[in-house]
Image: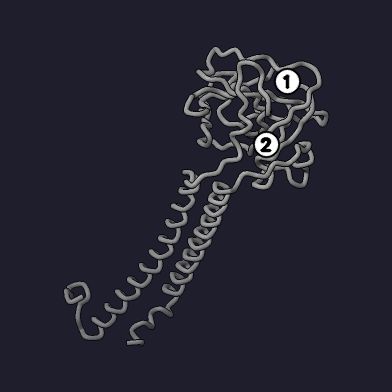
Amino acid sequence: MTSLYRFLLTPRWLAGTILALAAIAVCLWLGSWQLGRFKEKAAAQHAAPLPAAPAVPLDQLLTPRQPWVGTDTAGRAVTASGTYDAANQLLVPNRTVEGVKGFYVLTPLRTTDGRAVTVVRGWAAGPATHARPPAPPSGHVTVTGRLHPSENSGMNGAIAGGLPPGQLGTIAPATLVNILPYDVYDGWVAADTAPNGLVSVASLRPRSGSGLNLRAFQSLGYTLEWFVFAGFVVFMCFRLARHEAEAAADRALGIDPVHSTSR
């Protein structure tokens, strides 16, 4: 029976085997990577709220060596000093607080290093269209609040494009690059105190809960898909090799494999 599988040593089958092994390796690697992403998102979802700690300057948390908001800095109390850019104040619609839909009031805070801190000064109920939020204070101010990571489209009510001027769907540097004439820090700060007519959203983060969010389940689904693809490649290789061996056995017995119905 072993001789029937000698075809596996032919150039055509050796090349196919190498290609199949490469495909399996890629599928397993991608599956493992997605599994790691799932674990990260699950850990972030179930992370306990950070202990109370004194507010620290934002530029001490977000440095040139660590410019991104991570799981160790999200939810931290921070301070930032500068002047509000009232001319570029934006409204962020479709934000729900305690079951009521409304909008954030986002105002860039220009710091002494030239960059801006994206500050959500508060939330108001109702549609953002034609809303008249309170103007930010003038002059030099110091803001204390909670640091949030940058958003992706589809998370926390974020929406992509199609909004009128003066509105923003996703709070992230990538969406602000074409709106603001200066660089911004990663993430955004929810101010602890809000002006009259607005509600502070600083307490909305960090989150905890027993359920996993949709993005975590998406990563888990992708993990299963890649592992299934790897198993399918193995199955097909086995089936093709067995079919070839059966055809060789039929030829050795003088049976025409095309007309044989015994297999």
Residue drawn at (56%, 37%) of the image? 152
Q: Secondary structure at mark 1?
A: loop
Extreme residue toward the front, this view: 52
| Of 251 and 181, the residue lying toward us | 181
Q: Quadrant of residue 171?
A: top right
Q: Answer with left or right where residue 174 lies relative to residue 4.
A: right
Tell me if label 1 and label 2 are in contact, CB under 8 Å. Answer: no
Report the amino acid beneath label 1: Asp
Q: Nearer the viewer, mark 1 or mark 2?
A: 2
Its colouring scheme is one colour
Residue drawn at (59%, 34%) of the image? 204
Image x and y of residue 28, in percent: 49, 63
Residue drawn at (66%, 24%) of the image? 121
What residue is disc 2 on?
Answer: 147
Report the amino acid beneath label 2: Leu
Label drawn at residue 85? 1
Q: Quadrant of residue 69?
A: top right
Local packing at callout 1 (Cα closer than 10 Å; few below 14, some 14-19, many 20+) is some
Q: Secondary structure at mark 2?
A: strand
Label drawn at residue 166? none
Above or below for 246 versus 118: below
For the C terminus, the quadrant is bottom left
Q: State the separation of the CA atoms marked 1 and 2.
A: 19 Å
Local packing at callout 2 (Cα closer than 10 Å; few below 14, some 14-19, many 20+) is many
Residue drawn at (49%, 51%) of the image? 219
Extreme residue toward the right, this view: 112
Image x and y of residue 168, in percent: 58, 25
Which comes sooner in the sequence, label 1 or label 2? 1
| Of 29 and 242, the residue lying toward us | 29
